[in-house]
Image (cartoon, rainbow, N blue to C red):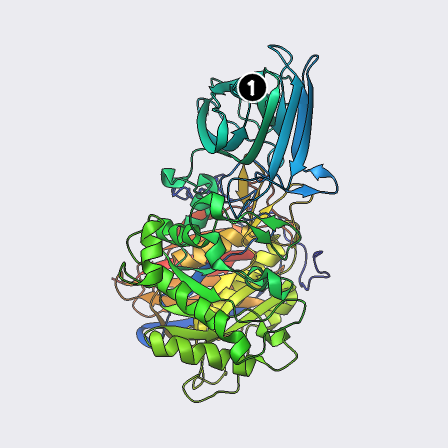
Amino acid sequence: MLPLHPLDRSGSATASRLAAIALLLLAAGAPIPAQTDAAKPAAAASASAQITIDASKIVNPVSPMLYGMMTEEINHAFDGGLYAELLQNRTFRPSWMGVEHWDLIRNGNSVAEMTPDKTTGPSAALPHSVKLAVTAASAGSEAGIANSGYWGIPLRARTTYKGSFYVKTDDAGVGPMTARLVADKTGATLAEAHVDLKPGAWSRYEYTLTTGAIAASSTNHLELTVEHPGTVWLQLASLMPPTYHGTPNGNRPDLMERMAGLHPTFLRLPGGNYLEGDTLQDWYNWKTTIGPLVDRPGHQAPWTYWSTDGLGLLEFLEWCEDLKIEPVLAVYAGYALKGDHIAPGKDLEPFVQSALDEVEYVTGDASTRWGAERVKDGHPAPFPLHYIEIGNEDFFDKSGSYDARFAQFALALRKKYPQYKLIATAPVKEAAGAEPDVQDDHYYKPPAEMMDFVHHYDNAPRTGPKIFVGEWASMSGVPTPNFGSALGDAAWMTSMERNSDLIVMASYAPLLVNINPGGMQWSPDLIGYDALNSYVSPSYYAQALFAGHLGDGTPQTSVTGAGERFFYSATVDSKTHTLHLKLVNASTADQALTIDVKGGTGRTASVISLHASTYEATNSMTDPGRIVPKMSSETIGAEGWKHTVPALSIQVVDVPLK
Ligand code: AHR
């Protein structure tokens, strides 16, 4: 999707705002550098506005789970993204182009062929393989196969990579197999290991490769070769770098740290459209995503590519555990993206049972059928769970079947698990006992529309289901949001904070994008990366700041005289006695304010600012620090706090109240 224009703006051009030069590494937990030079905005200022805050009068609670994350397999979020596996097409799936991402190696005078073989594989889930038939090979004339990874294989100095593969061979003399990491540009061997092969049935082999003092790069590939004639069949070839917390079959550390920096409280999983699949055959059948990798067939995902399911249900849950957040578990509810649905009633029963089993896998103890399965898979402790979502975007189902499908799931889930809150993905005509606790609303809008939408929930009824804004984003910027989007997002977040008595959870989408050519199916996306590095967008910083400075109640406030594109929210943390104020000026004119904080006189407010000179300004892989938060402080005087929010700025202000 392309960025949406034109953006709405007003006022004259803004002179660039001076600020202390500092890079914020929010995700890494580094301190935010101080702003040493008071900014002197040059643009015409709007008339001064007055904000009055009585922090002692709390009018509404703020949901403790307001900010979370949403995920699905899109933009190579998992395969070629968060999931640390380095080999692409590790299960040798053939296509009309051959066995993609694998090349045949025929060094020197070797003679060899590589062909897909549908007749043999190591498991029922992987019943096929690739056959490497070598008729001539010797030292210096090796034959084998090479994998180019997900847009290269990223390698770093003095790092150990764990490799494995399944092999079957009838030839005692064909081995050993050599695993070699090779620099694409020079052919230099960067690490090497030898694996003895034993003739007979399919066996799994492991090896390690350790690099020396190399420069980090992703222009590398893996070679698996032999020096003797013979035939070997290969399947499930894997290469894992160090993972977050060292978890086996785990995640890429930099992306986990980026996510931790968002201060999330939950992860909505596994989708999104990824839950549904394009057709009724492609639904997210979680039972095929657990257990040993060799027992996971993978499945066709809706965003054009195959999912290995290496990051399966248990890995989703461990991801939550690693970030100390809880899953918001979406269960498949019988609707496919292309419009088909499963009729409520008998046909839907197996899917309802699957959902019940899934909840049991997540939360059950060892005495339950599926809890025991999770224990067997290596995770004895049940996972915390409070919310279950039934389907995804079922408002697209024009057949009208969602009312009955929701009711069938809700009644069964409530009967067995009355303690969990149920989320509907469209308004439902309520059946007795099947009322949704929460409704999931999604908003993707250009920044200007997002800003115009901020009063949507102000007068919404408080008597029906609570609201989960399960997907939302201001849509401008490719591949990641530009500053106009950050302003739209920040404006929207002020409205969610103001209405957090109703909006219990919210999650931006999509979260991740592999920025390589062909890696992206949707833009903008919050966090960008290639094989080696990652960067974060201005929207990421806005969200990290909003979530990291959130109170538990909204105080009584009022504003008069503010410009059209000025937005604010205030929350109070009753434990730390801090007022968290969010000020968003999406106009090109400065906004002068007098802020009357009752009880705030003499206190020093810390101000974190995010600013750019245009809506189009953005961060990128080559310019990751263009827009970063900067810190300053101001003292609140007896006459109220005279404060200017510069044009095109997002500010998060903390005022100690004691
Ligand atoms: O976030 C991208 C997609 O947008 C999600 O998969 C879907 O739920 C929505 O339509």
Name the secondary structure under disc 1: loop
Q: In the image, is 174 to the left or to the right of 419?
A: right
Instruction: Tell me if I can see residue 533 in this picture.
Output: yes
Q: Nearer the viewer, residue 509 or 488?
A: 509
Determine which residue is flagged by label 1: 174
Q: Quadrant for residue 338, please give it.
A: bottom right
Q: Is residue 632 above or below residue 565?
A: above
Question: Residue 604 location in percent, x, y?
Answer: 33, 55
Toward the viewer: 631 or 184?
184
Above or below, comparing residue 139 to residue 300 in the picture = above
Q: Residue furthest top?
A: 139
Q: In the rendered view, tell whether residue 324 sits above or below residue 164.
A: below
Q: Nearer the viewer, residue 617 or 312?
A: 312
Q: Residue at x 58, y 31 (%)?
A: 233
Callout 1: 10 Å neighbours few (<14), some, many (20+)? many
Residue 362: x and y in percent read 36, 60
Number of callouts: 1
